[in-house]
Image (spheres, rainbow, N blue to C red):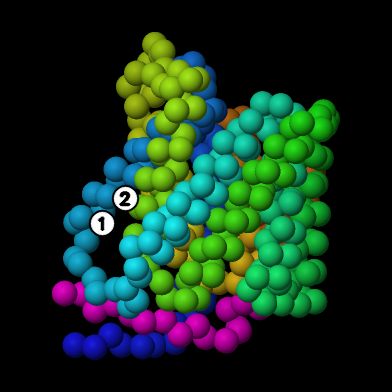
Amino acid sequence: MPNAVSGLPVGRDLLYLIVAGVAWGTAGAAASLVYRTSDMGPVALSFWRCAAGLVLLLAARLLRPRARAAVREPLGRRALRAGATGLGLAVFQTAYFAAVSATGLAVATVVTLGAGPVLIALGARLTLGEHLGRGGATAVVGALAGLGVLVLGNGGATVRPWGVLLAVVSAAGYSVMTLLTRRWGRDGAGDGSGTTVQTFAVTTLILLPFALAEGLLPHTAEPLRLGWMMAYIAAVPTALAYALYFAGAAVVRSATVSVVMLIEPVSAAVLAVALLGERLTAATVVGTALMLGSVAGLAVTEARGVRVPREEPVLV
């Protein structure tokens, strides 16, 4: 049977990105619990997160019925795509953890997540010809304002230039990963699950030597609790979230992706109040409202746009 070509609304892909952002927001709370129960370092945590996520993704791919790919890529192009996105992911995660260590969580978060949409919007305009538009620009400004209130309005922060530079490098890695995923998605190259598996394989190999230097195996008095937390981190904010992210980012405009993914700190703030006992402040409420409003407005605008043609694979 030939592949059926249908115009699917981007609304489903926006939902994928929202779920991925919420799942990413739970990683911070889970990582805090990991740090409380062991001496695991951030690079080792990132390595094990990617390695275990890769195992889960491979298992899911093997159990899934084989699908006929819409476009068959040459081996060299597949390797280039996996290497570029894997390197972007490794830079994104590692530079962010280093920025947190250098200048603190608040500043690292606001610079990384704040610079991301700006770099992506510029990159999408220059390399993909995507126009953000007045409504999109308003949403970006509103989301960044909400992020600033949410993160910096909850206490003092120390700004260190080296940490800010690392946060910008992290944002650049995230931007490259998003733009490449969108570019290859427009060409119909590959499939979402294949992209995620290949990217995680490359990222795991890149992080391995740095994790070995930091200390690969943690010491803990609560191995069972540590195991459960690592299993959660690998399954939900890693394997599930990144699979949804790569699927959605291949279809939705890059600038929209960057704004929708700002829902991550909203999810983290809600968990911090609900599970970690942090105090609900006016800054948390105002920042969350601004960011959710911006994400909702941009999602409605995107969902009402042109339907994106996509080839549905026929299961064999």
SS under mark 1: helix
- The residue depicted at 62 percent of the width and 37 percent of the height is 95
In the image, 216: left or right of 259? left
Provide residue 96's location: percent of width, then percent of height.
63, 38
Q: Residues within 10 Å of mark 1 (few under 14, many from 20)?
A: some
The quarter of the picture where the N terminus appears is bottom left
| Quadrant in the picture for residue 70 | bottom left
Q: Amino acid at mark 2?
A: Leu
Q: Which residue is mark 1?
A: 61
Q: Amino acid at mark 1?
A: Arg
Gap between marks 1 and 2 measured at Cα: 6 Å
- Taking depth in this image into account, of 306 and 126 the one nearest to the observer is 126
The quarter of the picture where the C terminus appears is bottom left
- The residue depicted at 75 percent of the width and 38 percent of the height is 165
Residue 194 included in the magenta stretch of the image: no
| Quadrant in the picture for residue 282 | top right
Q: Residues within 10 Å of mark 2 (few under 14, many from 20)?
A: many
**Pointers 1 and 2 in contact (C-beta within 8 Å):** yes
In the image, 214: left or right of 58? right
Which residues are drawn in magenta? Answer: 297-316
Q: Which residue is mark 2?
A: 57
